[in-house]
Amino acid sequence: MMPRLTARVSVGALAVYAVLLIASVVVAVPLFYLVVSSFKSEADFLDSVFLPKGDGLFGVGWERLTTEQFRELFSPPIGIGRAMLNSIFLASVTSVLGTLICASAGYALAVYRFRGRAAAEWIVIAALVIPPPLLIAPSYRWLYQLGLLDSYWGVILPAVAPVFGVYLFKQATVQSLPRSILEAARLDGANELSLFLSIGLPMLRPMVGAFLIITFLAMWNNFIGPQIVLQSASKQPLSVVIYLTQTSYYADYGLLMAGTLVSVLPVMVLFLLLQREFITGLTAGAVKGE
């Protein structure tokens, strides 16, 4: 029985590893294509799929690889360095403010009992089904009336309190934060702000890390919002500036790939730093708190 069981386990493990290997290749090939294409000239981009052919090692023309696209990206008139700083500022501020606001709102809905609480929960759930494109026109009018057009805050404010985040943190608080701990802290004299900052947020840390990444990615890749709100070229984020490098009559694909690689790297670094919190946060709902 034992050898047969071991054989079954081994075959099952091999099948799992085979599937994971195939999935890794499927994910890695587009990334490899992006990196290689960023260093190819325009002629080589159209002539070869991956590395340019030549007389070098492995039949590759290594001498034809170039960094001209990156020099062009960071030089006038493109000046992608300023666009990258704009994207980092917008994504960082939005993710931090959005996480704090959604965490506090979700915490309040889960912990406190107040008049109108049920109505507030129904409003949050109902707002989840509203397609975001429907909010573009009313948001634009609201920003115009507040005088926030062509300003960073005009892009940040509409994104700092997504109902998805409020609902996410509400559910995480219900499942991961035992009320007995809060009651014990109240008996020890802790005020409500201390409860949230010293107990609530630390226990919601996995969800905080996951939501930080989600919000950062959403703003980093935001393309329509900045185009509508920001009119000044110096304030445009990376996503818009990369798109503007192409015209209706000419497309430099090597330049486009180089810009895409530059835009992907900060996100990869952030995910590597917070990957444990991100994975834990996504699975936090599987274990219900007592």
Image (spheres, rainbow, N blue to C red):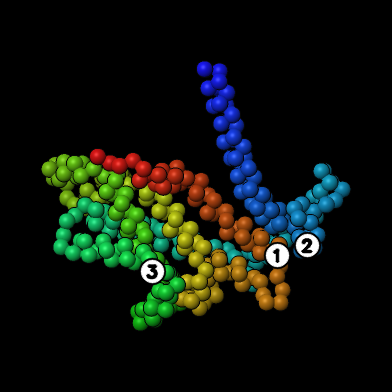
For badge 2, the amino acid type reads Leu
> What residue is shown at x 38% (from left), y 69% (from top)?
130
**Image coordinates for residue 178, horizontal then vertical, percent:** 23, 43
CB atoms of marks 1 and 2 within 8 Å:
yes
Pick the front one: 215 or 20: 20
Residue 265, compared with residue 289, is above or below; it is: below
Label 3: element kind: loop
Image mark for residue 253: 1
Image mark for residue 46: 2
> What residue is shown at x 32% (from left), y 58% (from top)?
166
The residue identified by callout 3 is: 130
Pick the front one: 121 or 206: 121
- Mark 1 vs mark 3, foreground winner is 3
> What residue is shown at x 60% (from left), y 32% (from top)?
14
Image mark for residue 114: none
Q: Does residue 112 appear to the left or right of 95 in the view shown?
A: left
Circle 2 residues within 10 Å: few <14, some 14–19, many ≥20: few
> What residue is shown at x 57% (from left), y 23% (from top)?
7
The mark nearer the N terminus, 3 or 2, is 2
As drawn, the residue found furthest toward the right would be 55
**Image coordinates for residue 81, horizontal then vertical, percent:** 58, 63
**Image coordinates for residue 195, horizontal then vertical, percent:** 22, 48
